[in-house]
Amino acid sequence: MANNKLLTAEEILQMSDDDYMDERQLAFFRNLLVQMENELRQNADQTTVNLRETTVAPDPTDRATIEEEHALELRTRDRERKLLKKVEAAIRRIDEGEYGYCEETGDPIGVARLMARPTATLSLEAQQRRELKQKMYGD
């Protein structure tokens, strides 16, 4: 490939099915995932700084507000920590040549779905089956 420029999301979506998960698409998704990973790590670092900079408020109401803000920030970071693990796993799947294919069926997940959820491991149909099963059986 003579041109190493990353494709845009629009260009990726317009590509033929024959180009699915070729080196250009993999480069696009790797870049997207690395950006997500960097952002999640920066957020975690900022949370650490925020929690260290806390001032002690003598007023119980102010103290309760600060504690609630910290609890909310920690819940958000916990969700982001779980997402970070998924992002790292997706990057590994790119390295292993498995990215973009359903882990249950082996079928392509689809570019549009991966644009919406770059960490997806299941095709839309497999995900819907799994959710239905969970709803029916409380899995």
Image (cartoon, helix red, strand yellow):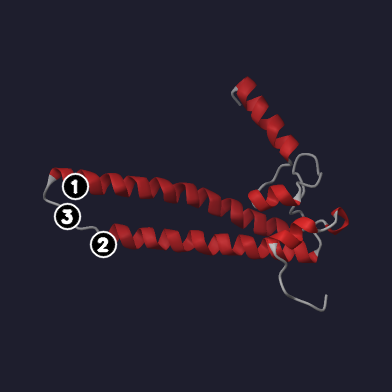
- Say whether disc 1 or disc 2 marks the residue closer to the N-terminus: 2
Residue 83 sits above or below residue 19 on the image: above
Of 52 and 18, which appears nearest the observer?
Answer: 18
Secondary structure beneath dot 2 equals loop
Gap in Å between the C-alphas at discs 2 and 3? 10 Å
Q: Residues within 10 Å of mark 3 (few under 14, many from 20)?
A: few
Gap in Å between the C-alphas at discs 1 and 2? 14 Å
Residue at the bottom extreme of this rendering: 2
Name the spot of residue 60 as percent of width and height, x first.
14, 44
Q: Quadrant of residue 36?
A: bottom right
Q: Residues within 10 Å of mark 2 (few under 14, many from 20)?
A: few
Residue that numbered label 2 is attached to: 53
Gap in Å between the C-alphas at discs 1 and 3? 7 Å
Name the spot of residue 14 as percent of width and height, x first.
79, 57
Residue that numbered label 3 is attached to: 56
Q: Answer with left or right where residue 48 lies relative to residue 10.
A: left
Secondary structure beneath dot 3 equals loop
Q: Answer with left or right where residue 56 lies relative to residue 5.
A: left
Secondary structure beneath dot 1 equals helix
- Pointers 2 and 3 in contact (C-beta within 8 Å): no
Q: Which mark is residue 2?
A: none
Residue at the left extreme of this rendering: 58
Report the amino acid beneath label 1: Arg
Residue drawn where x is 67% and y is 63% of the image? 30
Residue that numbered label 1 is attached to: 63
- Pointers 1 and 3 in contact (C-beta within 8 Å): yes
Residue 133 sits above or below residue 53 on the image: above
Residue drawn where x is 55% and y is 61% of the image? 37
- Pointers 1 and 2 in contact (C-beta within 8 Å): no
Residue drawn where x is 49% and y is 52% of the image? 81
